[in-house]
Image (cartoon, helix red, strand yellow):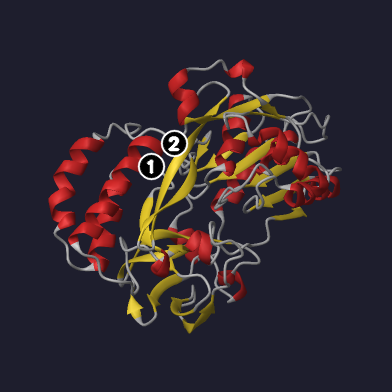
Amino acid sequence: MGVHSSLNRNDREAIFKKVCRLVETRHFNPKLNGVDWDAVVEARRDRILQIDSAEEFEKEMHELVSQLKTSHTGFFHRSARRIPARFAINATFQRCQTNDGERWMFLDVHEGGPAHAAGIEPGDLLMALNGQEITPPMQPMFRMGEAIKIGVQRRDGTQFPGTLPIPSPKSKHRPMAIPRAISFSKLSDGIGLLKATMFPGAVGIDVAHDITHAIRELADCARLIIDLRGNTGGGIGGLRLMSYLTPDKLPVGYSLTKRRAGKGYDKEKLPRFTKIPSHKSALLWLTLRYALIDKSIVVVTEGLGPQKFHGRIVLLVNQHTTSAGEMIAAFAQENNLATIVGTTTAGRLLSGSVFKVGHGYILGLPVAGYLTWQGVLLEGKGVLPDVNLELSCEALRESRDTQMDKAIEVMRSL
């Protein structure tokens, strides 16, 4: 957990009360998953307030808010903040049974990220972190800005003990390593492949330019596979990719604040975001336009015109496809714009924020929801693929991407 100052009973009680108040007033909907928050608080209050250890207090407080079962929810001390592998080393894991018992197997390893730079590949097994064996259900967590000793068993059985440098975050509010966001290639039979690992930037001007460049390079392809597996989401830059799925201007969905949800609303009358600006000089105008209004906003595709591959698109998703990646999959599915192959997405589609609660502690909470244009709240549910296919541990160990093979098979039938 890290080293931070001890707390007396009054300190713990003040933090506890502030956290409870913030959940009640700022969480998008504490009852979203059928949770009786008041009952949860009463059941845990005495035990939490009697804890002497600062580390145990942090652990119990995190467990408290975790009962809400929502994304972007957590409690941690700023000196000990650890983040998941998908953000820290740009890799995801899958639980796999091996001859040595259950292990974490690398699943998505994004180009340009720390894990990829170290030579780690899908199908490799994570054995240890800083000399300590790690097995499920313990989650691999990392600290930004430090070098971690990592033990990896490669697919051929050889060991890869080494040091994995993790870069310092560019943002304290959203600490993460940034992989290569967009890559593309041409496969056989006129099939284009575009991979999107995330959509960095709140407005996404740079990643929108990268998507446009990729689509132009693939313009002569009559079919398109879009790989969103392991996509960690990000800002509104994903709108550019959705806009290339259809020639028209179509409503995608809308964000919904706690205040707007409580007051009631007509989605047709909500403010609309219809275009990613071409230049960063427009950011000031956007800030002024949306600064003083409720952040319940409809997202609409940009109307970029017909593409050769329209009607012949396959989306690849998996259990690690989150946030904006799920928005794209849901939009494509609702409008019959693509065939979706893979496994059900993560169901992490709430907008999060962080709050200081005293003595260096931070509370993360979801403060707004996202609904598809048909009114579906995907949080906790995810997007179900049209063709459900899990990438097995056996296939990973043999370097076979059976999901991509299926996507190509489906594509050739379109």
Residue 34 falls left or right of residue 191: left
Residue 274, by quadrant, is top right
Residue 356, by quadrant, is bottom left
Please rate how many residues cluster around mark 2, counting C-alpha atoms within 10 Å: few if below 14, some from 14 to 19, many from 20: many
In the image, residue 269 lies at what x, y percent?
63, 17
**Residue 376 can be seen, yes or no:** no
Residue 347 falls left or right of residue 171: left
Quote the CA–CA distance across marks 2 and 1: 8 Å
In terms of depth relative to the viewer, which is nearer, 196 or 221?
196
**Callout 2: SS:** loop
**Callout 1: SS:** loop
In terms of depth relative to the viewer, which is nearer, 408 or 172?
172
Can you tell which of label 2 and label 1 is closer to the viewer?
1
Dot 2 amino acid type: Glu
Residue 90, by quadrant, is bottom right
Please rate how many residues cluster around mark 1, counting C-alpha atoms within 10 Å: few if below 14, some from 14 to 19, many from 20: many
Residue at 73% x, 42% y is 224
Closer to the chain start, of discs 2 and 1, is: 1
Numbered tag placed on residue 70 in the rendering: 1
Residue at 48% x, 39% y is 350
Dot 1 amino acid type: Thr
Considering the image in quadrants, where does the N terminus appear? bottom left
In the image, residue 58 lies at what x, y percent?
29, 61
Considering the image in quadrants, where does the C terminus appear? top right
Q: Are marks 2 and 1 in contact (CB under 8 Å)?
A: yes
Numbered tag placed on residue 363 in the rendering: none
Q: Which residue is mark 2?
A: 379
In the image, residue 27 lies at what x, y percent?
39, 38
